[in-house]
Image: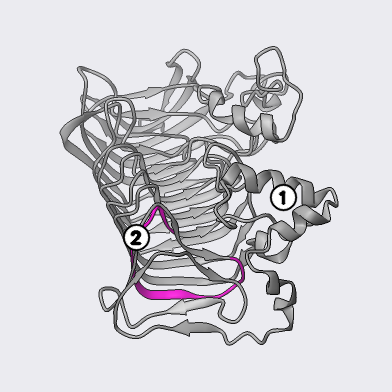
Amino acid sequence: MYGGRTAAEVEKLIEAARKGDEAAYDALHPHADLKHRNKRISLGALQIPKGTFRLTRTLWLCGVHTGIIGAGPGRTVLRFEGDMVGIRQIERGPIGNLTIEGGRVGIAITGADHHDHVPPLAKSYIAGQDYFNLEFKNQTFAGMHIGNDDPTRMGGAEFDQNKFVNLRFVNTGEYGIYFNNNMLDKWLLLNAEFEGQKKAGVSIKFNNLIHGGLYNCSFRNIDGPGIDFMGGNPFLAFRPYIVMVDQCEFRECGSETSPAVDFGYCELSAFLRTSIITTGKTVRAGFIGAPQHMEGVNINVRTAGPSPVLLLRAVRHGATARANGHILRDIEANGDVAWVNDANSQNELYRRTFEVYQKPMGSDGFGGLKWDVNPAGGELAPTNGWSHPYLLYKCSFGDRKFAYSLLNVDVDHNSIMQEVRLSEKR
């Protein structure tokens, strides 16, 4: 991007521009005349007719046309050749009715945030837009990349109130959709299909996803979790918040080292009416996560030996005290359930982010990053010892069944300290 510069070179220019370096600011303009782009009249979305179009350069949506609308997936095909970003979106506009083939990334929304002092074409704050009827095929990294061009760090613009409807991702490299920005706010993913990714269908590991929903989506034949939400904003120790997955299907996802679904430590979250089936390979587990409401879920996976198919985390692993407790209802699993506290297990992922933002390094090498410091699980824990209650109703985990029970769980040691069988109470 930007005249053949690497992502690292562009980041240095952006940082210099923020500090007032006019030469760096000017260098971020792809064309000399783009200093005058604000004088141009926007013509809205570019209408592309039926046909297959071979492209060897990135399409920038940044001025005269801010969106692209085709004649339909399979009818309008944009075929990008080479290790490149296909479409780079800078300004707000809809993208729909297309097939996007090839390239490293199909659509990249990876500029600086709207408040940063950088040239307009180095920003990518997108809000209130529709992405619909899109097919992504044969990328090498991801169908869509939102955040920062360097995938190993947190950065980029907020992505706010955008809707993804009827999107299909087939053999799109490592990911279907990869987010590494620090704020994903009010995001809808509806009727999406993911197949053939090497690491995850949807990866959200660097930001505080807020008010996000995945509905009626399918994930198939992925060599990693269909969704990987294990992460958050490391500077705030803030996990994704208010997240729902409903009426989805995960088939043949996961690997020996990863579950079919990693729901992370999402707070005030729900995982509902969904099936997780992996019988053609061995996976670490079917589901790992901390949903506060889990209902109508069927899990049938093949794990190594007697390993549990469902691993539950607890929400009180963060820097803020929030409502606690988990409700599981109508869960059918072909193996056992267990509890785990792995809140700090992926801290190495954030090393690059701490280096970029020059945060002070602690004795652990991560500036004291500790996800598991919530006072509600420590000095402000309930005096009766019920720090992590789980209410189970009509749940079956292999040979272990719960008709209607309230559990007090020690997630650090995977033990049930007390069970109150409410089904036997009168």
- Going by the numbered disc 2, the residue's amino acid type is Glu
Q: Which disc, if any, is residue 81?
A: 2
Residue at the image point whose x is 65% and y is 55% from the top: 157
Q: What crowding class fits label 1: few (fewer than 14 Cα within 10 Å), some (14-19), or many (20 or more)? A: many
Which image quadrant is residue 158 in? bottom right
Place of residue 186 in the rendered image (x, y in percent of width and height, measured from the top left): 57, 60
The residue beneath circle 1 is 14
Report whether 35 appears left or right of 57: right
Report whether 24 appears left or right of 312: right
Place of residue 391 in the rendered image (x, y in percent of width and height, measured from the top left): 44, 34
Q: Quadrant of the N terminus?
A: bottom right
Is label 1 in contact with label 2 (beta carbons under 8 Å)?
A: no
Q: Is residue 258 above or below residue 45?
A: above
Q: Is residue 305 above or below residue 192?
A: above
Q: How many marks?
A: 2
Q: Quadrant of the C terminus?
A: top left
Residue at the image point whose x is 75% and y is 60% from the top: 26
Which image quadrant is residue 164 in? bottom left
The question of residue 94 being in magenta is answered with yes
The question of residue 416 being in magenta is answered with no
The residues tagged by marks 1 and 2 sit, at their Cα atoms, a distance apart of 28 Å
Question: Disc 2 on helix, strand or loop?
Answer: loop
- Going by the numbered disc 1, the residue's amino acid type is Ile
Q: Which disc, if any, is residue 348?
A: none
Between 115 and 56, the residue placed more toward the observer is 56
Q: Is residue 205 above or below residue 178?
A: above
Which image quadrant is residue 246 in? bottom left
Can residue 46 be seen here? The reply is yes
Question: Disc 1 on helix, strand or loop?
Answer: helix
Find the magenta span and give its range. 90-106
